[in-house]
Image (cartoon, grey):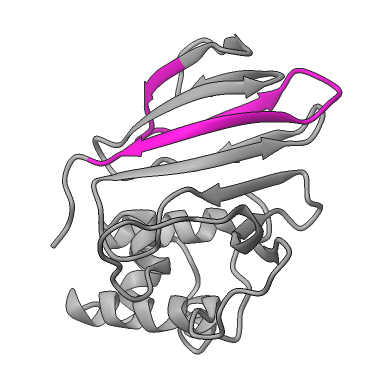
């Protein structure tokens, strides 16, 4: 996946949620909790020690793919790296308040449809791909399953060595996501899909 950028939609997010700061704090906490040095985590994730250090100090804008590699190496759900304060009761996620993770060229965006409030077994995302764009994803943690439904347009989904599957509006697919996989927009217009990510278990 491409360069991670955070785009506000309309009203600003409360300053208490500073994504680079929260990401850096979470990475340091999770790394030290597992007893990993920066060198050890770099070896496990394939992300350089220098980049990991910059992320921990909030000085880097990492790519989405790098964050997936780090979360897989730490054996934690992706959202755990971005989690803020715990929330309780009913939570409304206003579109105008959403934090959007986007590629540098803006051709791929993803929006979490759940609060970043700690580790969880299931995550729910909105995906948007510009016309003809192809988005590649690294293998997730063993046992991870993705369930994708096409809300608008058409996508070709390829997982590992399986034959690519073409999906149109209203179609859905369930596949094992612990292998490299990709999404290709088959149309000239933006395609929209909703993704449910299920992990084998929540890491405590």
The C terminus lies in which quarter of the figure?
Answer: bottom left
Residue 167: say if magenta.
Answer: no
> Is 60 in front, or is 170?
170
Residue 192: say if magenta.
Answer: yes
**Left or right: residue 191 compared with residue 145:** right
Q: Up-down: is 18 above or below 123?
A: below
Give the image location of residue 39, x and y in percent. 36, 78
Q: Residue furthest bottom?
A: 57
Give the image location of residue 76, x and y in percent. 27, 58
The answer to whether residue 180 is visible is no
> Is 160 in front, or is 130?
130
Q: Up-down: is 28 above or below 93?
A: below
Q: Residue furthest right?
A: 188
Give the residue displayed 78% in from the left and 31% down from the top.
190
Give the image location of residue 112, x and y in percent. 49, 51
Q: Residue furthest left?
A: 204
Give the residue displayed 82% in from the left and 29% down from the top.
131
> Is 103 in front, or is 18?
18
Q: Give the quadrant of residue 75.
A: bottom left
**Left or right: residue 108 compared with residue 72:** right
Q: How many marks?
A: 0
Give the image location of residue 105, x and y in percent. 81, 53
Give the residue displayed 38% in from the left and 19% down from the top.
174
* Magenta stretch, overall SS: strand
Magenta span of residues:
173-199
Q: Give the quadrant of residue 153.
A: top right
């Amino acid at each position: 996946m491409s360069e991670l950028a955070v785009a506000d939609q309309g009203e600003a997010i409360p300053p208490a949620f500073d994504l680079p700061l929260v990401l850096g704090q979470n990475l340091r906490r999770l790394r030290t909790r597992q007893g990993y040095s920066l060198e050890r985590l770099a070896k496990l994730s394939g992300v350089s020690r220098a980049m990991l250090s910059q992320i921990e100090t909030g000085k880097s804008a990492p790519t989405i793919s790098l964050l997936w590699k780090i979360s897989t190496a730490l054996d934690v759900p992706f959202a755990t790296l971005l989690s803020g304060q715990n929330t309780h009761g009913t939570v409304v996620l206003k579109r105008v308040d959403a934090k959007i993770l986007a590629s540098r060229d803006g051709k791929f965006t993803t929006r979490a449809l759940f609060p970043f409030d700690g580790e969880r077994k299931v995550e729910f995302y909105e995906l948007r791909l510009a016309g003809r764009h192809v988005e590649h994803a690294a293998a997730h943690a063993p046992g991870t399953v993705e369930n994708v439904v096409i809300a608008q347009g058409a996508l070709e989904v390829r997982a590992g060595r399986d034959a690519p599957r073409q999906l149109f509006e209203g179609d859905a697919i369930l596949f094992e996501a612990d292998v490299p996989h990709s999404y290709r927009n088959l149309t000239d217009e933006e395609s929209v899909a909703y993704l449910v990510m299920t992990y084998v278990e929540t890491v405590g």
